[in-house]
Amino acid sequence: MKFAWANAESFDSASAVLFGVPDESGSSSQRKGVAQAPLRIREVSNEREVFERGGMMFTTVPFCGSQVPIFDMGDIARTEVSSTVERIARAGKLAVTMGGDHSITAEVLKGLDRLGMKISVVYFDAHPDFICSSREYYGSVVCDIFDYRNIDFASSIEIGIRAPEPEELLNIRRRHLETITPLAIEEHGLSHVIEEIKLRAGGHIYVSFDMDAIDPAYAAGVSTPVPGGLSSSQALYILRKLSGMGLVGFDVMEVCPPYDVQSMTSHLAARLIMACLPDVTG
Ligand SMILES: [Mn+2]
């Protein structure tokens, strides 16, 4: 089954290439099931965004005007992620990853790092994922990726943070990583978030989206929920602004279908993916 909005027949004809990584070997959560996310996100996009009328099928057009050509290349293994992303980026296309657990983001950025351009990361998460005393799992992603040559710490930013461990707070302070909490968004507004990103980020932005950045009221189906997160519309607003700022890739991670309510988290994940695609004119 293909993602409902995957309207391109081939890799070559697409400007965005989507793939799933049904793997949760980097997760230590007691709530298992994020490996089921790529299939469920595809299923729910077809259930709720495609309509039959008079024997014809119609797909909704979310956010991005006339449709961006998207190719769904299916699922791949964790070990194939970095080379696949490198191939997509070298072809001048936007790589879109559906996890799986959040440690897969380190594999994606390993691939983008090989292109040699400086990359700013906008990292949505309830947790900083900035443990350095333990490595290569879903809690150390930020520590792992900042070892890469072209991932730029100073221009990167974390959004939605509200459940840090003591070690992570220390690492954030020591390394001066910019973070914006949901309470800071309440206080300063969404336009402040956009200004902060514009102030820092360079020409090449990678967006990593852990679904637990969203409030469990809108996204219950995650492996590590934390109350007090972003609303759906806050997240969509920020992502729509980012879509016009030169994204080199995007991922949506940590959707956990066994803990979801009426697949609402998978449905929102499908919409977040579309929100990140640039508008097409003409
Ligand atoms: Mn995470």
Image: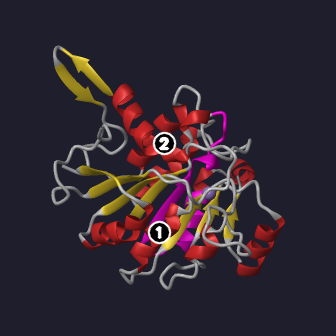
Residue nearest the viewer, comparing 190 with 94: 94
The residue carrying mark 2 is 36
Residue 81 falls within the magenta-colored stretch:
no
Report helix, strand or loop for mark 1.
helix
The residue carrying mark 1 is 107
Q: Position of residue 213 (x, y in %)?
A: 63, 49
Where does the magenta region start and end?
192-217
Q: Position of residue 122 (x, y in %)?
A: 54, 64
Mark 2 vs 1: CB contact within 8 A? no
Q: Position of residue 240 (x, y in %)?
A: 44, 50
Report helix, strand or loop for mark 2.
helix
**Residue, x 40% and y 73% (percent of image)?**
111
**Residue, x 40% and y 65% (percent of image)?**
81
Whichever of callouts 2 and 1 sits on the residue coming sooner in the sequence is 2
Determine the CA span between mark 2 and mark 1: 19 Å
The 10 Å Cα crowd at callout 1, few under 14, some 14 to 19, many 20 or more, is: many
Which three-letter amino acid code belongs to the residue tagged 1? Glu
The reply to whether residue 8 is in sight is yes
Residue 59 quadrant: top left
Q: Residue furthest right?
A: 166
